[in-house]
Image: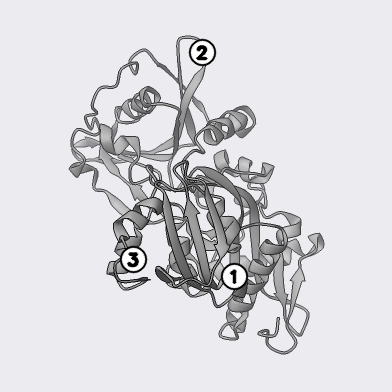
Amino acid sequence: MSELPDGYRVLQVPAERQDEFLAVDRLAFVIPPDPAVDDVVPFPVPADRMVALEAPDGTLAAVHGSYPFRLPVPGGVVPCAGLTWVGVRPEHRRRGLLRAMIRAHLDRALARGEVVSALFAAEAGIYGRFGYGSAADELHLTLPRRAALRPVPGSEELGVRLEAADEARHGALVQDLHERMAHRPGWATRPTPELRVRALVDPAPWRDGAEPLLLATVVDASGEVRGAAAFARKAQWEPTGPSAVVRVRQVLALDAAATHRLWSFLLDLDLTTTVESPALAVDDPLTHLLVDARPARPRVSDNVWVRVLDLPAALAGRRYAAPVDVVLDVTDALVPANAGRWRLVADASGAAEVVRTGADPDVSLDVRELGALYLGGRSMAAQAAAGLVRVRDGLDVPAVAAAFTWPVAPVCSWVF
């Protein structure tokens, strides 16, 4: 930790200092204490993953934590450190503490055998300089009531149950559905009891005037649950009549019929005029079911960011959409073991071998661009066109780029 200013040290935060850890993050993110929230929302960062930089006076100057994810990637799952709760007290800024914390996080994750790290960026301009690449997008739709959907066989045979959402009663059901949908790259599931509680917890200050959270479940003729949607309505009245907004927190569906049935229900609630979707993959089934997507006012923003930590393990831990034999020349300012030339060979099954090589490079790129490619949602050809990667003359760029893509777009359905 030579980059630390004099007198600062890295500290695994003991349980008795959790409140101080939380106070630093509240100050950094402008989150005032609220007993109505704090009494029902559990602190989610595992005790052995709370890390801080302690100032010379013994107080905590900066904090961060991480979650122990098994991250779905193209054709596989890899151990991942989900970076979170990153904050620096205002009076300690501009001293290199963030960089020192990221170094500490990367070192600790590598020591645990986590081959990638992932995060959601509160400010998009920060994390690229530490090797994180924007690896997925999310889509938000603002749908008019009764937006028409194309028919799906079996949808009308499914029933819908509506109940007040309750973590004790419904938490295991929602977790099971979420885990069964983890075939999509980036779809991190909640690995700890504290994170699972937060999936359905509903303190009044979070509602912004909406009703308590509701849960609609879709069931087949045998009573098996095929999907669920958590949502709440916010009443609004205009001179022309009722104009409530339906705010959908999450939609989980195991097949096309369940997807169609859930959205048909959400799009036809009485006294409503607008339905706001949660974060969706850019190729979510709903985008194909809408007869006319234009009135849904689609908005795309960045979703999960990925940082490769152990390059050979990470690249061998995913599958490739086409055979490829390519030499990558990678730069990495923070993890020198990743830097240099690597030969990646993937066969027709998609399985890959990654080894050091002295051969001339086909593609030269920074670890940031490699992270952006990792979940299969970015195009190497587009990166090359933007000047972010360099390719040798004569390389079949479309073929190499195709190998790194994946048939479904990546997304993480919740912000960690």
The amino acid pointed to by label 1 is Gly
Left or right placement of residue 130 versus residue 40 in this view: left
Residue at image location 53% in from the left, 67% down from the top: 30
- Distance Cα–Cα, label 3 vs label 1: 31 Å
Instruction: Single out the mark in the foreground, 3 or 2.
Output: 3
State which quarter of the image contains the N terminus.
Answer: bottom right
Asked if one can make out residue 382 in the rendered structure from this viewpoint, the answer is yes
> Residue 354 placed where, x, y %?
55, 58
Above or below, 173 against 81 in this view is above
Label annotation for residue 383: 3
Q: Earlier in the sequence, mark 1 or mark 2?
A: 1
Above or below, 405 against 407 in this view is below
* Closer to the camera in the image, 395 or 137: 395
Answer few, some or many: residues within 10 Å of disc 2's Cα (few below 14, many 20 plus, some between 14 and 19): few
The answer to whether the residue labelled 3 contacts the one labelled 2, judged by CB atoms less than 8 Å apart, is: no
- Distance Cα–Cα, label 3 vs label 2: 48 Å
* Closer to the camera in the image, 331 or 251: 331
> Residue 150 placed where, x, y %?
23, 26
* Closer to the camera in the image, 210 or 52: 52
- Distance Cα–Cα, label 1 vs label 2: 46 Å
Left or right placement of residue 220 versus residue 39 in this view: left
Residue that label 1 marks: 87
> Residue 17 placed where, x, y %?
77, 65
Residue that label 2 marks: 223
The amino acid pointed to by label 3 is Gln
To which quarter of the image does residue 26 belong? Answer: bottom right
> Residue 325 placed where, x, y %?
44, 57
Q: What is the basis of the colouring in this image?
A: one colour
The amino acid pointed to by label 2 is Gly
